[in-house]
Image: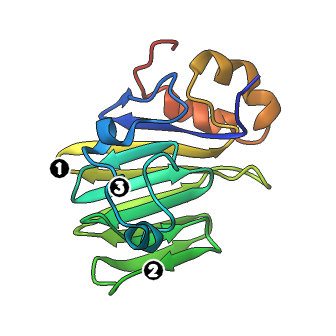
């Protein structure tokens, strides 16, 4: 049985980098944490970043964080855009770093800090599973995040049909492109 109802799979250059990790270490993943921030600085980033997300990609300049159905973009350690699904997203700051948001039926394409980002809902009904794609500094990132996602491949294979009866095949199709220990 899964330990938690939500999770994320962080894929960098075709390799699952958070296999067996429910929570990535922010410092290891992106090279910084907000542990030295003042309470005001933490509040401006939505209440703190380090330890409050399942997965992180990027670096000190561009960090993207994933928790449940939430995707948070930080540029130079400041929150600039937050996505909670097609109906709920927030631009923060001056908006100069996030442009050209184009909504499609179940996806959003953005231009974030000079690069395209694509977030697509791959679930049916109320499952809330998302596929995030971005290329940054020569690295290709894909993150599958949301309800029923488990980074322990053995657990995922045991529970996927029960948790995500309508979209587990879409998630597995993405995982077929990935190097993992268990597949």
Sequence-first disc among 1 and 3: 3
Name the residue rendered at 32%, 39% in the picture. 29
Looking at the image, do the residues carrying marks 1 and 3 touch, with CB atoms under 8 Å apart? Answer: no
User: Relative to 87, is 102 on the left or the right?
Assistant: left
Rounded to the nearest angstrom, the CA distance separating label 3 from label 2 is 21 Å
Instruction: Quadrant for residue 16, please give it.
Output: top left
The residue labelled by disc 2 is 91
Residue 63 location (% of width, % of height): 32, 55
User: Relative to 175, is 139 on the left or the right?
Assistant: left
Q: Element type at marker 1?
A: loop
The residue labelled by disc 1 is 137
Rounded to the nearest angstrom, the CA distance separating label 1 from label 3 is 23 Å
The disc at residue 50 is none
Quadrant (top left, top right, bottom left, bottom right) of the N terminus: top right
Q: Element type at marker 2?
A: strand
Q: 74 or 163: which is nearer to us?
A: 74
Q: 34 or 61: which is nearer to us?
A: 34
Sequence-first disc among 2 and 1: 2
User: Which mark's residue is nearer the viewer, 1 or 3?
Assistant: 3
> Is 123 rendered above or below residue 87?
above
Farthest bottom residue? 94
Is the residue marked by circle 2 packed among few (<14), some (14-19), or many (20+) residues within 10 Å? Answer: some
Residue 175 location (% of width, % of height): 51, 29
Name the residue rendered at 40%, 21% in the picture. 179
Q: Element type at marker 3?
A: loop
Name the residue rendered at 79%, 55% in the picture. 126
The residue labelled by disc 3 is 34
> Is 13 rendered above or below residue 38?
above
Instruction: Quadrant for residue 150, please give it.
Output: top right
């Amino acid at each position: 049985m899964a330990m938690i109802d939500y999770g994320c799979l962080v894929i960098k250059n075709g390799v699952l980098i958070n296999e067996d990790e429910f929570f990535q270490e922010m410092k290891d993943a992106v090279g910084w944490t907000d542990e030295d921030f003042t309470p005001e600085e933490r509040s401006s980033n939505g209440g703190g970043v380090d330890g409050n997300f399942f997965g992180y990609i990027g670096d000190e300049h561009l960090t993207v964080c994933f928790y449940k159905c939430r995707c948070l973009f930080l540029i130079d350690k400041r929150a600039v855009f937050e996505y909670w699904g097609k109906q709920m997203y927030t631009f923060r700051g001056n908006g100069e770093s996030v442009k050209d948001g184009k909504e499609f039926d179940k996806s959003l394409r953005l231009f974030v800090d000079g690069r395209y980002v694509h977030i697509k809902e791959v679930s049916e009904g109320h499952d809330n599973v998302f596929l995030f794609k971005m290329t940054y500094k020569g690295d290709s990132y894909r993150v599958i995040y949301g309800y029923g996602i488990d980074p322990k491949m053995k657990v995922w294979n045991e529970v996927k049909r029960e948790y995500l009866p309508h979209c587990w095949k879409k998630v597995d199709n993405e995982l077929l492109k990935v190097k993992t220990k268990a597949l």
